[in-house]
Amino acid sequence: MKRTMLSLSVALWMLIIISGCASLQVANEVQLGRNALQTGQPQAAVGYLRRAAELDPNYKTPYSIRESVWTYLGRAYYEVGNFPEARRALEKALSDDNDDPLARLYLGLTLLRSSDEQKGRRETEIGLREIDNLVNRLTSIPSNGIYWDPTWQIRSDIQRVLNANGMLESSELITLAERVGSQLDEEIDTVRRVEARDKYNRGGDM
């Protein structure tokens, strides 16, 4: 009986270790994919993010703005010009979380690039409006609000689109929306770095 219990305990610990290693691998693949997107290597990003989605299709980043692996995979497919796969991935992201503004934005851009002008504009503008609301909520948090979009570049680009009331040329809408999407993703990492630096400095002063 004792031997059986010991074997079960060992098996349980092994399962926990394996599960932890798998989670670390998924997080690493997603971060590598995000880095590739941020440095203009979308084809490499597709490889990393597709592997991550295969390992854990429910993975979300553990940051202030939690994004699905499908959102990033959809963006990667979008940036390599594979719009059918981009649409599938982004619709999967939205079926899991209908309030994902980055997925909504890139779905709109994908539709615009696929010549679905009316629906593409609608989805893009909804995504931009949701991002604007999200950033405004984040800036209202006393503890870390000062770190988000301090130059107002993200929100200025969004307001430029929304204030045009649908009158922007498609090319200009796409340019502004793509810039908002990439800036928001980079802002997530910038905020993490600044928060960590300030936390370290405060600890050093104690």
Image (spheres, rainbow, N blue to C red):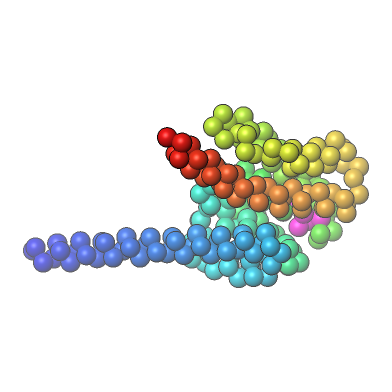
| Residue 137 falls left or right of residue 1 | right
Q: Is residue 169 above or below residue 88?
A: above
Please state the horizontal and vertical placement of residue 176, each as a whole percent of the image.
Answer: 81, 49
| On screen, residue 51 above or below 184 | below
Indicate the position of residue 89 as horizontal and vertical percent values: 64, 60
Taking the view exactly as shown, the residue that stands out farthest to the left is 1
In percent of the image, x 15 and y 64: which residue is there?
6
Quadrant (top left, top right, bottom left, bottom right) of the N terminus? bottom left
Left or right of residue 3: residue 74: right
On the question of residue 98 being in view, the answer is: no
The answer to whether residue 92 is magenta is no
Q: Which contiguous range is marked in magenta?
A: 107-112
Tag count: 0
Which residue does the image show at 24% across and 65% down from the upper left?
A: 11
- The quadrant in which the C terminus is found is top left
Residue at 51% x, 62% y is: 28
Residue drawn where x is 60% and y is 70% of the image: 47
Q: Main secondary structure of the magenta part?
A: helix
Residue closer to the observer: 160 or 101: 160
The x, y position of residue 150, in whole percent, is 69, 37
Residues 24 and 51: in front is 24
Task: Residue 193: tell me if it is visible.
Answer: yes
Using the image, determine if residue 158 lies above or below residue 83. above
Q: Residue furthest front?
A: 205
Residue 15, image x, y percentages = 31, 63
